[in-house]
Image (cartoon, rainbow, N blue to C red):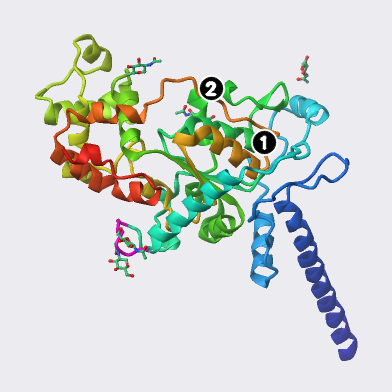
Amino acid sequence: MGTSRMFHIFVILGSIFMILLIIIYWDDVGASHLYLHTPVSPGPKIPHPPAPPKPQTSRTPSFLSDIDAFVNQFLEPGTGEPTDPVPHDTSNQSEKVEERYIPRQEWKVHLTPVAAELRERQEQRRKLLQEMCANDSIAFPGKNRSFDDIPNKELDHLIVDDRHGVIYCYVPKVACSNWKRIMIILSESMLRDGVPQRDPLAIPRDLVHNSSMHFTFNKFWKRYGKFAKHLMKVKLKKYTKFLFVRDPFVRLISAYRNKFEMRNEDFYRRFAQVMLRRYGNQPTPPSTVDEAFTVGIHPTFPHFIQYLLDPQTEKDMPYNEHWRQVYRLCHPCQIQYDFVGHLETAEEDAEHLLRQLRVDNVVEFPTSSRNLTASSWESDWFSTVPVEARRQLYKLYEPDFRLFGYERPESILNE
Ligand SMILES: *[C@@H]1O[C@H](CO)[C@@H](O)[C@H](O)[C@H]1NC(C)=O
Ligand SMILES: *[C@@H]1O[C@H](CO)[C@@H](O)[C@H](O)[C@H]1NC(C)=O
Ligand SMILES: *[C@@H]1O[C@H](CO)[C@@H](O)[C@H](O)[C@H]1NC(C)=O
Ligand SMILES: *[C@@H]1O[C@H](CO)[C@@H](O)[C@H](O)[C@H]1NC(C)=O
Ligand SMILES: *[C@@H]1O[C@H](CO)[C@@H](O)[C@H](O)[C@H]1NC(C)=O
């Protein structure tokens, strides 16, 4: 009696153990698929030219990374998931989708390698970031903290695409609408006639900036609870991370032109009225942006700079993202970016990046025909700003200048 019961228990325990082994093994196999780009057409394997180091395939075969993959796979499938190939829709439409859905194609064949000059450029930008982060004589708030110490709400600029293993830190006023469009296309969450939208410019502007379109790191808490920070670190290790930056002062001019020289009700009420009251001698500024433009009242560029330098500004709330420093938006000393684009070389960098991400067959970077703020206007714009204010402003943005290799604008600061 006793021995047969023992035997039963033994058999059951043994079976459970076997099943666990199978699951773990299976997951390991499945997980490597998860990180690889699934080649679709059965055509011949095309050797990919100068394969840039792909973080998502370099799995260290440690027990911990298996656990990571294991956790990942269970947590991935969910509602509105970026990894979901067929977005939720009416059954009618999804039938159509299945029938007409053309999955990602083979990687584009490149007969020439990425120009050595471009690779060198990236190498230098990454090296500069590392040096600046390691150099104690360059200090800024939050530089020394660890990734775990970054508050959740400060991770809201990191957009994650699990399909292609990409993380993009968006910096407003640095071609961010177009890169956000590309992230939407890569996520394949937007359909046109049942197939994923491929034309970046066909995505309407208000949709591009609607945060519900993007899966950002700060949303991890809601979905993954206490696993969130752990998962973020796994993804940061495996995915390709990129950002685009530009000359910090030119970015400020661009922000001013875009938000205060054009009619923008929201920015008028939140910021322009404050500037007019504080520095513009307007105790009761017009109540709407239309009224203000009709009577020709708007904050000047020096008012805007004064607003940035006013200690009261950050006491009220952190800088708006359009003028917040890149080091505060993207945490370049906690996150090791694989690719640092500059707006000044946007087209070359975009082409290089899309190729490095192996999505240049899926999407093209839209060329901009807008009247971009040019660096050459800088001295004109700053001519009305007192020299002392310019120097203080430089102090505020110095980390961005140093981290990303923009020269100190001597001609503006030494007058
Ligand atoms: C399915 O879609 C077609 C057009 O695409 C429409 O004519 C038809 O009524 C739809 N059927 C259902 C059940 O919604
Ligand atoms: C750190 O930065 C300072 C100031 O810019 C510079 O003089 C120094 O050479 C740098 N140190 C290293 C190790 O790069
Ligand atoms: C960061 O740490 C270094 C030494 O490790 C220290 O010299 C520096 O003052 C610290 N910076 C800040 C902003 O805390
Ligand atoms: C963003 O999109 C969601 C759903 O697509 C919608 O409910 C919401 O109103 C949009 N928000 C804005 C600010 O347009
Ligand atoms: C671009 O804008 C600047 C200043 O706002 C203006 O001087 C210039 O003529 C514009 N260029 C074009 C091509 O519209």
* Residue 27, quarter of picture: bottom right
Horizontally, residue 77 falls left or right of residue 304, namely right
Residue 209 visible? The answer is no
Q: Image point 79% across, 25% down: which residue? A: 96
Q: Position of residue 407 (x, y in %)?
A: 33, 45
Tell me if mark 2 has few (under 14), some (14-19) or many (20+) residues whose alpha carbon lies within 10 angstroms of its own. Answer: few
Q: Quadrant of the C terminus?
A: top left
Horizontally, residue 200 falls left or right of residue 153, namely right
Find the magenta span and give its range.
135-141
Q: Quadrant of the N terminus?
A: bottom right
Residue position marked by numbered label 2 in the rendering: 204
Which mark's residue is nearer the viewer, 2 or 1?
1
Which secondary structure lies at badge 1? loop
- What is the magenta segment's predominant secondary structure? loop
Residue 306 visible? The answer is yes
Horizontally, residue 219 falls left or right of residue 194, namely left
* Residue 281, quarter of picture: top left
Q: Image point 68% across, 62% down: which residue? A: 59
Tell me if mark 1 has few (under 14), some (14-19) or many (20+) residues whose alpha carbon lies within 10 angstroms of its own. Answer: some
Numbered label attached to residue 288: none
Q: Image point 36% across, 44% down: which residue? A: 406
Nearest to N terminus: mark 2 or mark 1: 2
Residue position marked by numbered label 1 in the rendering: 360
Task: Please name the amino acid that badge 2 sits on.
Answer: Pro
Whether the residue carrying mark 2 lies under 8 Å from ligand 4 is answered with no
Query: In the rendered structure, does residue 236 fall within the stretch colored magenta?
Result: no
Task: Please name the amino acid that badge 1 sits on.
Answer: Asp
Q: Position of residue 380 (x, y in %)?
A: 24, 26
Please tell me in which quarter of the rendered image ligand 1 is found: top right
